[in-house]
Amino acid sequence: MLVGHLPADDPAREALGAGLLEWLDTKRASALPNMPPKLQDYIRQVCEAFQIVALLDLKAAAHELRKKYVVWFAWASQLDLGPSRDARASYLRMLANTQITVADLQADGDSLAPFWTRLCREAGSQFPAGYLQIGLLGLRRLPSVKQGGQPWIGGLATWALAHNPSKPEFLAEWYPLKRLHPTKKDTVRQLIFDTLSSDPFASSGVTPPGWWENDADFREDKQTQSVAPNLFPPPKWVHEGIISDLEKNQSYSKLLPKLNDMVSRHEAYKDATGNGYFLVRSFCNIGSRLLKSTGDSVHERARFAEKLARAALQHEPGNLNGWGLWRDSLFNQGAFEASVAIGWEAIKRLPDDPLKRTGLAEVLIALDRSDEALEIVTTAMDQGICHGLTYAIAARIYDSKGNRSAALNVLTAGLKAHPDDSGLLKAKMRFDQVRPLSLVSGAKESMLKAIVSTDPDDTLIALERSGRLRQLRPRLTVDQTAMAELKRTLSEDPTFAYAQLLAARHSLWRAEEHALPPFAAAFEEALAEADVEKLKALAEQMPRMASLILLARAILGDMVAAREVSGRLANPHRKDDAQVSTILRGRFKPVADLIEGGTEPLEAIGAHADHLRLAIYDANEAVSSVDLFVA
Amino acid sequence: MSKGVSTWEDLRQGQMDYVRQYVKTNLTQPHTFMDALEPAGFTPENPAEFLVRLEILSVPLKEHGWSFKDLNDARVGNHTPGLNSFCNTWNSLRDHRPAFSTLLSSVADAVESPGWAEILRDQLGLAHFDGAHVPLPVALCKFSVKDVCREWTNSPPWQTSTPITKPTVLDSDLWEHYFPAPRTVPHGQAMALTPCTDAAAIKLELLNARVTYRPENIWKVGQIVTRAPLSDITSLRRSHREALEHAHGGFGV
């Protein structure tokens, strides 16, 4: 080679490039030879000129030929006398091969990507079949390929969609690419999945792996699945693809097929094996990320997250993350009362989890119900069920009310208990700088601006109705309007279970008036009437409520029950009434500490009777709310 | 040939125009093999004989988007789909010009040597195979006489009874490294890149009609990393001519 080894800025190279361009300009400006032998030689020379530009990476010439693409492409398109005399093909190959060379001179080095994809689609129709190789070459030579990604997969799929190749035809094009760009199987699967899950493939009914199903790598999966369908949890790439799309702010319409696919795979695995472990964790993880994602269709994202939360909780009713996800997904749909209702349900069922309390407090603050939020966090602090955020929220609320000294006290107490908590440290810093503490969290504030409320479904309506009653609960003993509203609600719907329960608690409901009185309401009635015998009779009907009934008897002065319930709640391995015991155990701790210190169980229980009565109410409400999980 | 040839430059230009329009062509049958022009056809004694040709791969590799390593890896791994794809691109870039080749039996020793690519270059007079600054990827393509005949003797409208011929000066551009063989010799005699001291060492040279390459035709691949030997062209041609005259008693002109 005369100049191939010379540096790019060598005058000889530059002169060659300039000379070639000038020669091409002259040819373009002159008439084509009309004698076929001369014409084919003319085209051969033009082809070789383009080949030299690419072979020697003549940057200035390549840039000029690309800049005036319309002119050069139109001219080269005339010069086609068959494969070895096709100046258009040579021109396009030159463009493909010099993309990286001229990338720094372009606003977008990848700007030819759509053209290469079009070339793939139209190879064999508007362009000769061999142009598929040129289109794929163009995609392989995109400057961005160096950073990862395999756009030729999309190009190949585009060709396949347009031309419906036979299996051998498709694999003949795929296998060379696969070998040229060795990648982990899972990565390739993910890329294929991502490509085929988007339009135009998804809307054309192509389901992954599509044309790749005859690749040996996918054939293994297909065989495995046909031998033992769904006996493997969904592969990691299913979730990683969704997470990657969420991080890239992908539109919801493009996310949805992948989300549905994930759900189907998990449900299939769960149905086949009975193992819901992966389903619960994946649904909570993806649902949480869905809520945090930015982008379009806020409501739809939240709705889907709610669907995931409910499904997770159906399999694992005590899952901490599932409850928080459900609560927050309702908030993001604008179903505020339902969100609060679920927030309370979560606290009832998971009384020892500080996150459930702070989560509900954040929701209430966003809804301008700071007083309720303050009660939650101060109660949590009193009960020792708190973390740094509990104190931070309390400080924010006190600060918003102008009570700086209370805010400071709370921050100080919080930092004493949690000296490394970054949220508390930031709040204290702001406080010391005499700056106000933000009342509403940033996440909730953003969400309030984005929420577009839509018509709630029956479940949300029921949740919101429970939520409104839940707000009445603390006022029923002191506020006649609250009591009047309860009565009105019950008269409008005598079968409303929660209304029955509250009514029974306040002696407004009678079990004997009902053929099949629900246990929860009957229990409340027996407790309200302090009827130990009625409670004993209910225990025989509902052994899974044994601890609840024993504790109720204990606060009514039943010494035997007091001893027995202490023993039960001290043993975390009892299974017969695990659900209610789990809820009560945390609330029983102060009593347990007294008993351990030598106090008699009845005396210890009596010392905390009011606190335990509330715990009993919460536990009864929690275990009786099973209808919330019906989707 | 154009009319009014009165200078060396006219002759040179006329030759170039002729070769580029009627020999290096894809539109019509190259004159080299046109039965009507009575080419000097060559038929090897052994019909099972193989022909070999050294090809430069720079352009086909570039146009296909492969590096030399990609080609080598595909061959080592016997990756048929990849090699088929490469051959498809390569064939689409090739026209129907006659191809200089030789009989495998003529260069069997060289082919088995470690530096086979450079040895063949030097023996066959391929002065343009220069790898001094940038390694030059090459392939030694092997195909049978039957392959050539099968592709062209029964393929109208370009069928020919002489798909393998003895090279003449009109079959390529004027080039100082081409030297015609005596009339009495049925094949070409390649002028090596080093002075000839023994006519027996001169390698047989042929032209064959285009063979559509398949992966199995790519027999060996390598890289030429040296410059072609530099010899005074006048001395080179003189020693070659003298060797031919000595071996064949003149050029039969």
Image: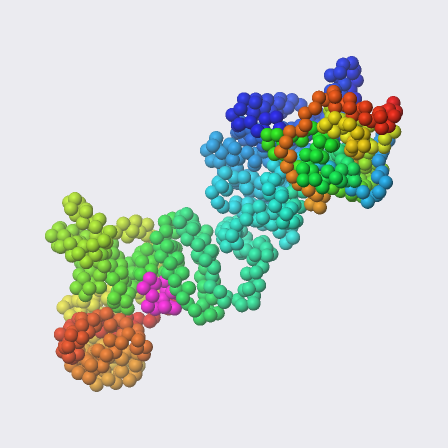
Residue at 38 percent across and 48 percent down: it is A295
Residue span colored magenta: A308-322
Which quadrant holds residue A471?
Answer: bottom left
> Which residue is more in the foreground, B144 or A278?
B144
Q: Is residue A416 visible?
A: yes
Front-lying residue, A148 or A361: A148
* Residue A340 seen from this side: no
Q: Is residue A367 above or below residue B41?
A: below
Quadrant of the frame with the C terminus of chain B? top right
The verdict on residue A316 being magenta is yes
Dominant SS type (magenta): helix
Q: Nearer the viewer, residue A249 or B106?
A: B106
- Image side of residue B213 versus residue A414, left or right: right
Residue A300 picture quarter: bottom left
Residue at the spot 74% in from the left edge and 29% down from the top edge? B192
Percent position (x, y) of residue A185?
52, 54
Residue A622: x %, y % from top left: 28, 70
Give the position of the N terminus of chain B as an image quadrant. Answer: top right
